[in-house]
Image (cartoon, grey):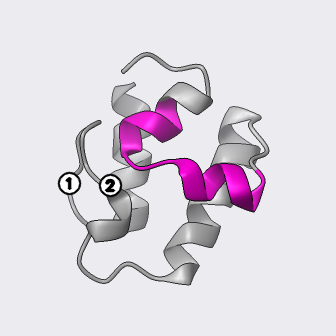
Amino acid sequence: MNEFLDRMSSILETPVTAATRFREVEGWSSLMAFAILVTLENDYGRRMMIDEFNAQETVGDLAAACGLER
C-alpha cells in the first residue's frame, strides 16, 4: 500500500493518504486522471473504465479496486 500511496502522491504532486479525495487535490486535472488510469493498468494490471473510475472517491478506493488493502 505504501508504494501505491507514493505513486499516487507523485501523480497528484502532493502527499496523500488512503483517505485523500483525489479530485479535491489542488491542481486536479484531466491529465492527472489519465495518469492514474495508466498507472492502474500498467503497474497494477487493473484496467478501469471511466464510469468505474468516476465512482471512486478516495485514493483508498483506487487501491481497493486494485486489490490492495487500505
Q: Which residues, given as a range, are shown in magenta?
A: 49-63
Quick check: 26 left or right of 38?
Answer: left
Q: Is residue 52 magenta?
A: yes
Depicted 28 relative to depicted 49: above or below = below
Depicted 35 relative to depicted 4: above or below = below
Which residue is rendered at x = 66% and y = 57% of the image? 37
Which residue is rendered at x = 51% and y = 40% of the image? 62
Q: Quadrant of residue 13?
A: bottom left
Pointer 2 or 1: first along the chain:
2
Tag 2, which secondary structure? helix
Mark 1 is surrounded, within 10 Å at the Cα level, by few (under 14), some (14 to 19) or many (20 or more) other residues, namely: some
Q: Quadrant of the N terminus?
A: top left
Amino acid type indicated by mark 1: Pro
Which residue is rendered at x = 67% and y = 40% of the image? 43
CA separation in Å, label 2 and label 1: 5 Å
Amino acid type indicated by mark 2: Ser
Q: Would residue 13 be visible to someone looking at this image?
A: no
Q: Position of residue 7 (x, y in %)?
A: 43, 48
Check residue 15 in the rendering and tell me which mark sits there, or answer none.
1
Depicted 45 relative to depicted 11: above or below = above
Q: Position of residue 17 (x, y in %)?
A: 23, 40
